Image (spheres, grey):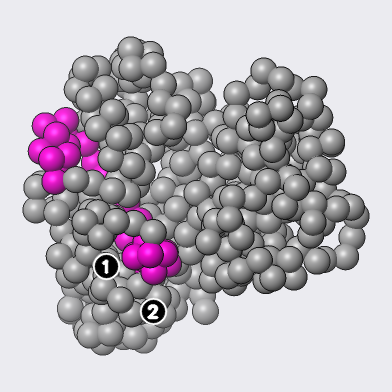
Amino acid sequence: MLIVNAEIDGRCGQDVRSLEGIIQEIGPDLPLHPGEDVFDARGGALLPGLNDHHMHLFALAAAESSVRCGPPEVANEEELAAALALPGSGWLRGIGYHPSVAGDLTRDDLDRWVPDRPVRIEHRSGKMWMVNSPAAAQLRLDEEPDIPGIERDAGGRPTGRLFRLGDWIRSRLGTRTFPDLSAVSLRLAGYGVTGVSDANPTIAGDAVHELARNHSAGALLQRVQVMGGLDVRVPAEGLVNLGPVKLHLDEDRLPDFDQLVSKMARAHGNGRPVALHCVTRTELIFALTALQEAGPLPGDRIEHASLTPDASLTLMQQTGVTVVTQPGFVFERGDQYLSDVASEEQPLLYRCRSFLRHGIPLGGSTDTPYGLPDPWGAMRAAVHRRTATGSRLGQDETLSPEEALALFTSPLEAPGAPPRRVEVGAVADLCLLSRRWKEARTRLLASDVAATFRDGQRIFAR
């Protein structure tokens, strides 16, 4: 393919030739080769394709057919009841719930609104499902007294709140089919995303096979790095690659310290870094202390770093970890944070500038479907640090537009590394902004993507 009339690094009128997925030539007025496809950039800014360094592909696809049960679509109990009042008798799947809507839901709460069909609603964090009594009966919760994660009341009755049991629910229901990825893949390509890191900690061989099958069928357009556990395997060739070992930490049930250190050491012994889910200060300190004990490996990551005290920054420096965070939550959830989080901790939420100031590599992600899938929205939030209502949150953590863009243009396998560039020898994963970069920068990163390319082949345009 030959892309003509593009702006690259501020230089107008540039042409870019790619062959077999690699950029071969860059310059003005390159001659057309026989049989070569031509794409006119019309003066748009040609950038490296974006990498979303932490998201959940299958959950995003499943969310497309789910009921929104939390802000901003649903804000109170009446709106939740209305959202759940859908015709039908089969399972009803809800997502995005937050206690600000109607408190900490139990099966009895859900029974008041939907007594006659099974309902399961996922908490906005992704760590908990809430089910009603018909759903509890189908899941046979009363028959499983010893499964950790099934919350019970003082009398031993399941409350309908299930923690970290998403895979168990699917297994119990016998739903081993996977949602169609084609629509969400096109949507991601529409934002200029050419690579994603799937952060599912329990991804298994059948899911990896499904990703590879979708690539072969043309339904999945992005390169994918999968995390998962130590036993995950990926095809020797193709667009699915192996990433770090994902380790979940939940403050209310932290693992045995020595066992966590052992898991880290085994991952490192297999040449794989670890990616540690940390959203509280306790989880963060626990993770960094264990990593020091295990001995760090280049590529070790802290996922989210939702709340990072100043004292943790030095420890992060010492361990050499990369942080992959979600600045988009400042916009999407910021007003809730301003209401729920203590004022002295609000400046510590989803920090950006402090990590760069301390030399800590920083990658960006959307965490979709738990956040919006638009990386440009995340970049704008990193620059503005404004909530949906316009309040400032962590104004000392702002980034420049160029720094915000770099969060999503670092290599898929190395978030926080120097951003990729449109240059000879680079992989031809590209996105084109329909307006000039100078104008886009003035408007502080607008997501008007005109075309997206993977391996130099156009995969989507709008």
Give the structural element (helix, strand or loop) at label 2: loop
**In terms of depth relative to the viewer, which is nearer, 252 or 366?**
252
User: What secondary structure is the stretch in magenta mostly built from?
Assistant: helix
| Vertical arrangement, residue 127 with respect to residue 248, above or below | below
Q: Which residues are magenta?
A: 310-339
Image quadrant assignment for residue 366: bottom left
Give the amino acid at mark 2.
Answer: Thr
Give the amino acid at mark 1.
Answer: Leu
Image quadrant assignment for residue 50: bottom left
Image quadrant assignment for residue 31: bottom left
In the image, taking residue 28 as reference, residue 94 lies left or right, namely right
**C-alpha span from label 2 to label 1:** 11 Å
Can see residue 298? yes
| Vertical arrangement, residue 159 with respect to residue 444, above or below | above
Q: Position of residue 182 (x, y in %)?
A: 64, 58
In the image, taking residue 270 as reference, residue 132 lies left or right, namely right
Q: Residue furthest front?
A: 154
| Vertical arrangement, residue 306 with respect to residue 343, above or below | above
In the image, taking residue 218 as reference, residue 434 lies left or right, namely left
Q: Position of residue 338 (x, y in %)?
A: 34, 65
> Could you tell me which residue is drawn at 25 percent across and 60 percent down?
343
Asked if the magenta segment contains residue 38, the reply would be no
Which residue is under mark 1? 393
> Could you tell me which residue is drawn at 38 percent across and 79 percent down?
389
Circle 2 crowding by C-alpha within 10 Å: few under 14, some 14–19, many from 20 = few
Which residue is under mark 2? 389
> Could you tell me which residue is drawn at 81 percent across and 30 percent down?
140
**In terms of depth relative to the viewer, which is nearer, 86 or 202?**
86
Asked if the magenta segment contains residue 314, the reply would be yes
Q: Position of residue 134 (x, y in %)?
A: 84, 43
Give the structural element (helix, strand or loop) at label 1: loop
Circle 1 crowding by C-alpha within 10 Å: few under 14, some 14–19, many from 20 = many
